[in-house]
Image (cartoon, rainbow, N blue to C red):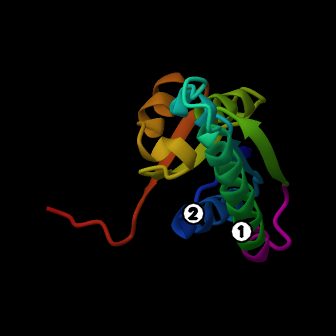
């Protein structure tokens, strides 16, 4: 069995993915996507002449790279000895998750809600569930209020 963990800043999804991989003797690959869609989100500032957009994009890239480093460090600390690898790519978050999932995975594990890059404002979970070529296991926040 092969499991893909879509990494964000929620540790519970990592714990669940590791538990599933250990129980099933599966290979677990963790994928962190550096969101490269900020450029599309901000539009153009060619009329302003102040290049504020470039400064913002540089700032967001720095934040994305910092988030990638933190996620990698946290994941590797928890996954020590687990078979699999940590993958980091740059691109459209949902697109990259789906592209990797198409590489023969049996299960994708991700947080619900998924908090990665601009996906905080979009519905990444719905897009992945709708288009994923394999099963998707959603991990809710532990402190979610149950009605």
Is 76 covered by the magenta stretch?
A: yes
Q: Are marks 1 and 2 in contact (CB under 8 Å)?
A: yes
> What is the secondary structure assignment of the residue under circle 2?
loop
Q: Which residue is nearer to you in this view: 118 or 23?
A: 118
Query: Quadrant location of the C terminus?
Result: bottom left
Asked whether residue 80 is in view, the answer is: yes
- The reply, left or right, for residue 45 in relation to residue 142 is right
Residue wearing tag 2: 9
- The reply, left or right, for residue 142 in relation to residue 34 is left
Is 110 covered by the magenta stretch?
A: no
Q: Residue at coordinates 43% horizontally, 51% vertically from top-left?
A: 112
Image x and y of residue 44, in percent? 57, 25
Mark identifier at residue 70: 1
Residue 32 higher or lower than 91, as above or below: below
Residue 1 higher or lower than 16, as above or below: above
Quarter assignment of residue 52: top right
Q: Which residue is nearer to you in this view: 109 or 99?
A: 99
> What is the secondary structure assignment of the residue under circle 1?
helix
Q: Residue at coordinates 59% horizontally, 33% vertically from top-left?
A: 94
Q: Which residue is nearer to you in this view: 85 or 73?
A: 73
The magenta region covers: 75-84
Give the main secondary structure of the magenta stretch: loop
Image x and y of residue 64, in percent? 68, 53
Among the two numbered marks 1 and 2 on one chain, the one whose residue lies closer to the N terminus: 2
Which residue is situated farthest in the left direction here?
147
Residue 74 higher or lower than 4, as above or below: below
Mark 1 closeness class: few <14, some 14–19, many ≥20 residues within 10 Å: few
Asked whether residue 4 is in view, the answer is: no
Mark 2 closeness class: few <14, some 14–19, many ≥20 residues within 10 Å: some
């Amino acid at each position: 069995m092969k499991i893909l963990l879509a990494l964000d800043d929620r540790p519970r999804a990592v714990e669940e993915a590791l538990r599933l991989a250990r129980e099933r003797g599966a290979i677990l690959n963790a994928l962190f996507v550096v969101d490269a869609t900020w450029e599309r989100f901000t539009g153009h500032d060619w009329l302003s002449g102040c290049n504020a957009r470039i400064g913002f994009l540089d700032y967001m890239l720095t934040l994305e790279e910092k988030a990638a480093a933190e996620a990698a460090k946290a994941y590797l600390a928890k996954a020590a000895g687990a078979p699999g690898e940590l993958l980091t790519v740059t691109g459209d978050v949902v697109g990259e998750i789906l592209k990797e999932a198409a590489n023969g995975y049996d299960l994708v594990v991700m947080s619900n809600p998924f908090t990665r890059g601009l996906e905080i404002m979009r519905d990444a979970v719905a897009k992945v569930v709708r288009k994923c070529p394999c099963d998707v296991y959603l991990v809710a926040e532990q402190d979610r209020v149950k009605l």
